[in-house]
Image (tube, rainbow, N blue to C red):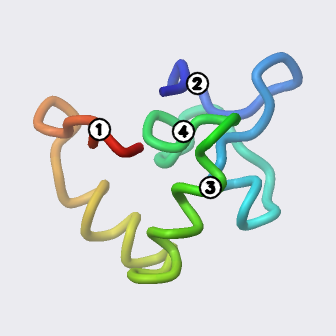
């Protein structure tokens, strides 16, 4: 998993932002779940099934942060 800090020069963008080719901002909703190393491949699989918008709306934003858990495959 990543440090959850989002993008930056030192850490680099999260896997989701790499896949979507967008700037990874601090506090990126995907960063805790899709690290910079393997996160691109994992997000690609999620994106293929749900799409980026649905992944953020239903899987991440609908669940309060304390109740979110990291999936073992992510």
Closer to viewer: mark 3 or mark 2: 3
Q: Are marks 3 and 2 in contact (CB under 8 Å)?
A: no
Cβ atoms at labels 4 and 3 below 8 Å apart: yes
Relative height, residue 21 to residue 10 (above, below): below
**Residue named by callout 2:** 5
Q: Which of 13 and 37 is in front in this view?
A: 37
Give the crowd class for mark 4: few <14, some 14-19, many >=20 residues within 10 Å: many
Which residue is at 63% across, 33% downward?
6
Judging from the image, what secondary structure is the residue with disc 2 in? loop
Please report contact status of discs 2 and 4: CB closer than 8 Å, yes or no: yes
Q: Which residue lies furthest to the right in this view?
A: 9
- On the image, numbered disc 4 is attached to which residue? 31
Residue 18 on image: x %, y %: 76, 54
Q: What is the C-alpha distance between the residues marked 1 and 3?
A: 17 Å
Secondary-structure class at tag 4: loop
Label of residue 72 in the image? 1
Query: Which of marks 1 and 4 precedes in the sequence?
Result: 4
Q: Which is more foreground, mark 1 or mark 3?
A: 1
For label 3, the SS is helix
Image height of 11 relative to 26, above or below:
above
């Amino acid at each position: 998993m990543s440090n959850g800090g989002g993008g930056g020069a030192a850490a680099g963008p999260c896997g989701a932002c790499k896949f979507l080719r967008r700037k990874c901002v601090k506090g990126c909703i995907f960063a805790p779940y899709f690290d910079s190393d393997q996160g691109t491949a994992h997000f690609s699989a999620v994106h293929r099934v749900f799409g980026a918008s649905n992944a953020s709306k239903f899987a991440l934003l609908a669940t309060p942060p304390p109740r979110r858990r990291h999936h073992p495959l992510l």
